[in-house]
Image: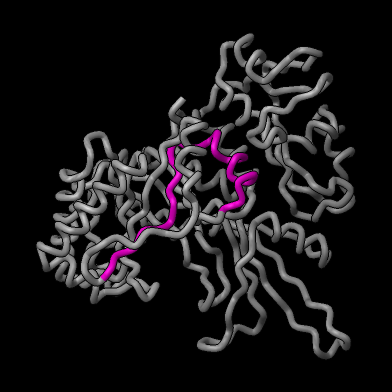
Amino acid sequence: MRIHTVERGETVYSVARLYGTTPTRIIADNLLSDPSRLAVGQDLLILEPDVVHTVVGGDTLTSVAARYGVSLNQIWRNNPILGGEDFIYPGQELNISFPAPALGPLFAGGYVYPDVDRALLRQVLPYLGELSVFSFGIRDDGGLIEPEGGEDLISLARSYGVSPVLVLTSLSERGTFSPELVSRLLSDPGLSARLIGELSEAVLEQGWGGVDMDFEYIPAEYAEAYADFIRRAKEGLPEGTEVSVSLAPKTSASQEGLLYRGHDYGLLADAADRALLMTYEWGYTYGPPMAVAPLNEVRRVAEYAVTEADPRKYSLGFPNYGYDWALPFIQGESKARSLGNEEAVRLAKEKRAGIRFDERAASPFFTYFDRPETYADAVEHVVWFENARSVEAKARLIADFSFSGIGVWNLMRPFPALWTVLNQLFSLRGQE
């Protein structure tokens, strides 16, 4: 795999000639919706399969997989143009295999809300080991709050060999993360026992393969109680249910702030089967413009995490989104607009903005002016997002620290480059 950064004047055709490939292959491997327009600074993936199959009449995806002794998921992963569906046609070229990935195995997971677009979800399920559905909450009496809709997500995930995961958060009946609710739950054995009981029933009756605990804003004095709750939940859940925990991005044990003090990395990683480092939101809606997950800051979290637990316990969090800030940024007044990574590239094309790459943050960004009726009213914007190069940088960080997985927040927006890069660098471990 090579990543080509588009220069001024380049086209899909000129890039294809440069690498001795075809425009059709570049368009298919990058899922380019409008190949006639490229943004300066846009990343294009140049893939080099070692086995290619040309579809002939009578072929089905199942028969092609059987012929080469590979899984359907592998064919879907190697051919994002299929969108996780079975339709193929004579003359179509299918990537059967690529050279062995350099960075070894990786367990991939991602989060969705119940209303996720099913077609979009089918595109990414072949890459996943687990699908986490956000989220179950907690009633004041310790009972479970179930999300509305999404009943088909469990069976859809399992049809691709993916384990469906119930996400339990400290969201209250009022729809907010509640430190008061967490304090009551962790200090009252009756409330926590009821919650664990209802959680166990939901897992058994609905068919969940795992539970992910995401309690936020935990008072510092309840750090040990939170780890103990996870341990008791693991013991009380049906046999074989994997329990994971989401961790705020700390860089030291003594890090101040309500978001951090209640998350003891060592205790929580020991209590759960796996732990997700929520390494994103440095750049956020109400904060100053910067990368959502700057590599230098993500590395600091990783460096601390491995001092507290076996690195194989961890998955690295990855943000599938960016932000668009109007300038100048005014603390307490400015509010950034969230946008998808594919949307960011389309915006750069529309505004004829050149995409640049911050080497320290290992993240792309660009600036543009909106187009008001008069030039005097023009407002400058800056957009930070993720692209193939930023994915590769974080992927190599995962390998550097020997983490076992990656967890994507979230899968509600398309970002095919993420999955293609991961598939080229790692052997993605699913349930196949």
Evaluate whether residue 103 shows in this view.
no
| Image side of residue 124 versus residue 354, left or right | left
Magenta stretch: residue 26 in it?
A: no
Identify the image quadrant of residue 340.
Answer: bottom right
Residue nearer the viewer, 11 or 108: 108
Q: Which residues are magenta?
A: 116-139
Identify the image quadrant of residue 122.
Answer: top right
Give the image location of residue 365, x and y in percent: 66, 63
Please give the name of the residue rendered at 77% of the width and 17% of the height, measured from the top-left corner: 55
Give the image location of residue 235, x and y in percent: 16, 43
Residue 264 vertical position relative to residue 382 in the rendered view, above or below: above
Please give the name of the residue rendered at 67% of the width and 37% of the height, measured from the top-left corner: 83
Residue nearer the viewer, 239 or 334: 239
Please give the name of the residue rendered at 73% of the width and 43% of the height, measured from the top-left corner: 44
| Image side of residue 91 versus residue 298, left or right | right
Colour pattern of the rendering: one colour
Q: How many marks?
A: 0
Residue 103 vertical position relative to residue 275 in the rendered view, above or below: above
Give the image location of residue 92, x and y in percent: 80, 23
